[in-house]
Image (tube, coloured by chain):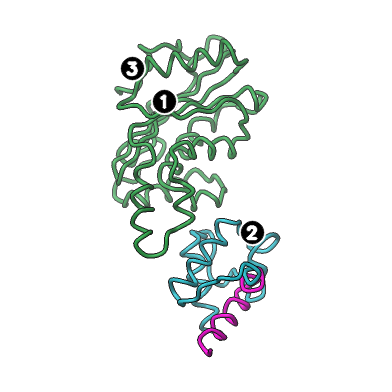
Amino acid sequence: MITNYCYIRNKTIVVRGETLFNDGSSSFDDFLINAYEFLKADYPKFYKMDNLSKLGFLAAEALVHDRNLKQYSPETVAVVLSNSAASLDTDLRFLQSTKNVASPALFVYTLPNIVVGEICIRHKITGENTFFVTPSFDPEFLCFYAKSLFERNHVQACIAGWVDVLDEHHDVFLYLIEKESGSEGMEHNSDALKKLYAR
Amino acid sequence: MEKLMNDLKVQIIETLNLKQLKPEDIGDDQPLFMEGLGLDSIDALELIALLQQKYNIKITDPQEGPKIFKSVRTMAESIQAHQGS
């Protein structure tokens, strides 16, 4: 079952259809910092992350903050994310830095799956984690992949979705799938994901 | 020396994205790594790049690193020694 979902679009964080935080008048970089401070995450490493990881971090915070993820063993929680720009946003910044002195801090973020690692470290998740690069949000594929994790890998919960950023263009849609959620949530299938993403 | 140490604190915060800190939060003799500011190995590389970029100092001997980056004061002393040489 999909038990929670959130978006970050147009410098606005929306959880289950309700606006959690909006900072449309700030620059994109300032929006990310202001959103972090609003969420009171108290995680100084956030400031060092690239924008892809910051977006994933913020969305994951908003997604799980009223869910009891700690009820699951760390190895039974999975993270499956995807996007189209991979780490290009940071790749370009790193390339720019090489014209002077190449930045090691930027270099370590020149892979798209680092955002998954940051989320796993933050939430002490040690289950399956994967990052796919696809031309656009692919509900059929993500649904198929997540379902296979639940069926074959003893996964109890999975943070999944789309985290894309290039320059200031950003599009984030994360959702939480839980195996045992009672009657709470909506069926996890590609039609539901398609509808949720299109909102 | 005082001005150089203050400049370094500002540059360290800016370069390492330590936005939760103010320059006055960093002690002159506070260890930069481990139990001090808690910097990591990537931060060490950024500090090496900072010295190269801002002060034209290239660290070629790896043994020098721990001595130079012990604290803001030892960084400032290294810069002064370099500028005086």
Q: Dot 1 surroundings within 10 Å: few (below 14), some, or many (20 or more)?
A: some
- Reading the image, the residue beneath label 1 is A16
SS type, badge 3: helix
SS type, badge 2: loop
Farthest-out residue, bottom? B84
Across and down, in percent, residue A148 comes to: 52, 13
Query: What amino acid is labelled 2 in the image?
Result: Gly
Residue B70 colored in magenta in the image? yes
Q: Residue at x 54, y 37 (%)?
A: A117
Magenta span:
B66-85
SS type, badge 1: loop
Q: CA distance from mark 3 to mark 1?
A: 15 Å
B37 horizontally vs A60: left or right: right
Closest to the camera, between mark 2 and mark 1, is: 2
Across and down, in percent, residue B36 comes to: 67, 64
The dominant secondary structure in magenta is helix
Question: In the figure, what tint was chain A given?
Answer: green
B50 shown above or below A63: below
- Reading the image, the residue beneath label 2 is B38
Query: What amino acid is labelled 1 in the image?
Result: Arg
Closer-to-camera residue (A121/B70): B70
- Reading the image, the residue beneath label 3 is A194
Question: In the figure, what tint was chain B given?
Answer: cyan
Q: Quadrant of the C terminus of chain A?
A: top left
Q: Chain of mark 1?
A: A
